[in-house]
Image (cartoon, rainbow, N blue to C red):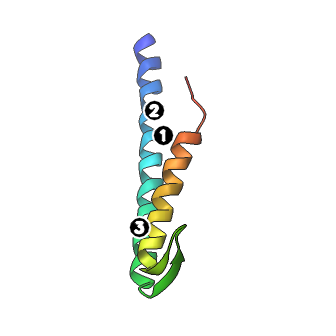
């Protein structure tokens, strides 16, 4: 009986992990598509200077920064 409970719990964990991986892959695909579509250079105002940067780089850096902030700000689930 306990092995059935463990198997069911393991299935739920794997299902959640698969769902998370799927969401990340969809997110990554969207970032890549937006990057290929947006190839123009845009003006970026840095603190000290400003310059022209490809829009795909701005989108990519913003996506990575948002993902890192989301991981850091996520509450612990222990």
> Which residue is denoted by mark 1 in the rendering?
16
Q: Quadrant of residue 11?
A: top left
Tell me what residue is drawn at x 49 percent, y 84 percent.
42
Give the SS element for disc 1.
helix
State the separation of the CA atoms marked 1 and 2: 5 Å
- The C terminus - image quarter: top right
> Which residue is denoted by mark 3 in the rendering?
29
Sequence-first tag of 1 and 3: 1
In the image, is residue 67 above or below residue 9? below
Mark 2 and mark 1 in contact (Cβ < 8 Å)? yes
> Which residue is denoted by mark 2 in the rendering?
13
Residue 43 located left or right of residue 25: right
Q: At which x and y percent is residue 18?
A: 42, 45
State the separation of the CA atoms marked 2 and 3: 24 Å
Tell me what residue is drawn at x 58 percent, y 39 percent.
74
Mark 3 and mark 1 in contact (Cβ < 8 Å)? no
User: In front: 34, or 68?
Assistant: 68
Q: At which x and y percent is residue 66?
A: 53, 56
Nearer to us: label 2 or label 3: 3
């Amino acid at each position: 009986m306990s092995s059935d409970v463990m198997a069911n719990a393991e299935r739920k964990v794997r299902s959640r992990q698969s769902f998370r991986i799927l969401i990340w892959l969809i997110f990554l695909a969207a970032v890549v598509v937006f990057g290929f579509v947006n190839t123009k250079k845009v003006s970026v105002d840095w603190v000290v200077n400003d310059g022209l940067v490809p829009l795909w780089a701005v989108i990519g850096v913003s996506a990575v920064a948002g993902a890192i902030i989301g991981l850091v700000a996520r509450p612990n689930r222990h």
